[in-house]
């Protein structure tokens, strides 16, 4: 990682730790010890394994979507790039930020940049479609129950509607970019020239040529998905659903481990709202936002004495564990690059 990325990682971890400390300070009381005496380590371990299973689903999605375009990406390589992606996501605004890492690692596995970009973009589109569909399902089929659950957080319904609009715009933009790649080229070139007028980009002409080439490659990859990669889209959708359902189930598992009811429906709705909030680029890795959001929403039905401990465990699994696994994955990548360079110098 670059020096600036280390700085943002420390800022992200520090901010998250500070907010968690505040949450624990205002929620822990004399009854917390009584609740902690009911803790079941089995369910806590199961929650960690559920998160690992989610990453397994994510890696399978990348592997099968790449295979549908005709590229053979090893499963271990896919799993490692997912872990490395999480470290970068922890230092960029929101939890979405590891795309360049995934593209680079797919390229290292023999997938051209255009096709790798198409795979990663399609992942994000599938995430948006699945989250939007789950939100629609919750709001339409849970009816008044959804309203009662989100009454303590007035922006929840608004966020779901905003997510639907974002998904529709993204899908339309995706379809239009497949049919009209020249429009995407003009937009990127205009943006590059706008940046050049303010910050004087070096080798602007070279950059514009690269845009022409990569947009063509990218468009080619999207066309492949639409025409020949439909099987990959089916598998991608399936594993996207499995990924999010597995991630959402972690909270219920932690609640059971803390001696509380699973609150399956309530937790599902809260996790859905939090997933949308975490996509908004507010803080590095969503730190602070996730802790405060989870505390506010789970505080509606989880005893206040235990909600702080619950949020702490939830973030230990979904954030701090991601950082640790990402660091280990990055060491694997650094070692691979070092050995590759050493081999070239011989």
Image (cartoon, grey):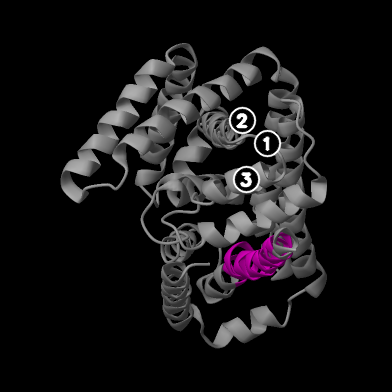
Residue denoted by label 1? 111
How far apart are labels 3 and 1 at the CA level? 41 Å
Of label 3 and label 1, which has the lower sequence position?
1
What is the CA distance from the residue labelled 1 to the residue labelled 2?
A: 6 Å
Task: Give the residue pinned by disc 2.
Answer: 115
Nearer to the camera, 198 or 16: 198
Whether tag 3 and tag 1 are in contact, CB under 8 A, the answer is: no
On the question of residue 56 being in view, the answer is yes
Q: Position of residue 298 (x, y in %)?
A: 52, 60
Q: Residue at x 75, y 57 (%)?
A: 52
Above or below residue 168? Residue 344 is below
Q: Residues within 10 Å of mark 1 (few under 14, many from 20)?
A: many
Which of the pair 343/59 is nearer the observer?
A: 343
The Cα atoms of the two marked residues, 3 and 2, are separated by 38 Å
Image coords of residue 22 (percent x, y): 41, 79
Q: Are marks 1 and 2 in contact (CB under 8 Å)?
A: yes
Q: Which residues are magenta?
A: 313-341
């Amino acid at each position: 990682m670059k020096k600036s990325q280390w700085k943002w990682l420390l800022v992200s971890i520090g901010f998250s730790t500070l907010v968690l400390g505040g949450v624990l300070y205002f929620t822990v009381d004399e009854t917390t010890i009584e609740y902690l005496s009911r803790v079941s380590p089995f369910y806590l371990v199961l929650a960690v394994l559920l998160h690992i299973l989610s990453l397994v689903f994510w890696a399978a999605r990348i592997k099968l979507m790449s295979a549908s375009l005709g590229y053979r990406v090893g499963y271990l390589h896919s799993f490692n790039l997912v872990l490395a992606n999480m470290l970068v996501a922890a230092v960029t605004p929101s939890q979405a930020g590891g795309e360049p890492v995934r593209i680079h690692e797919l390229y290292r596995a023999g997938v051209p940049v255009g096709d790798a970009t198409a795979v990663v973009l399609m992942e994000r589109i599938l995430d948006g479609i699945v989250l939007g569909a789950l939100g629609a399902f919750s709001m339409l089929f849970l009816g008044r129950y959804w309203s009662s659950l989100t009454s303590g957080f007035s922006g929840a319904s608004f966020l779901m509607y905003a997510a639907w609009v974002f998904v529709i715009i993204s899908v339309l933009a995706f379809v239009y970019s497949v049919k009209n790649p020249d429009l995407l080229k003009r937009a990127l070139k205009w943006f590059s020239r706008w940046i050049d007028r303010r910050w004087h980009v070096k080798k602007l002409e070279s950059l514009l040529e690269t845009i022409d080439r990569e947009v063509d490659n990218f468009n080619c990859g999207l066309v492949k998905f639409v025409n020949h990669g439909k099987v990959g889209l089916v598998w991608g959708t399936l594993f996207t659903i499995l990924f999010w359902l597995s991630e959402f189930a972690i909270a219920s598992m932690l609640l059971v481990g803390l001696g509380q009811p699973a609150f399956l429906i309530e937790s599902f709705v809260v996790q859905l709202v939090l997933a949308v909030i975490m996509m908004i680029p507010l803080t590095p890795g969503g730190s602070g936002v996730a802790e405060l959001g989870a505390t506010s929403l789970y505080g509606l039905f989880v005893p206040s004495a235990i909600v702080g401990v619950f949020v702490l465990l939830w973030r230990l699994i979904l954030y701090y564990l991601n950082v640790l696994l990402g660091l280990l994955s990055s060491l694997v990548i650094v070692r691979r690059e070092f050995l590759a360079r050493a081999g070239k110098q011989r």
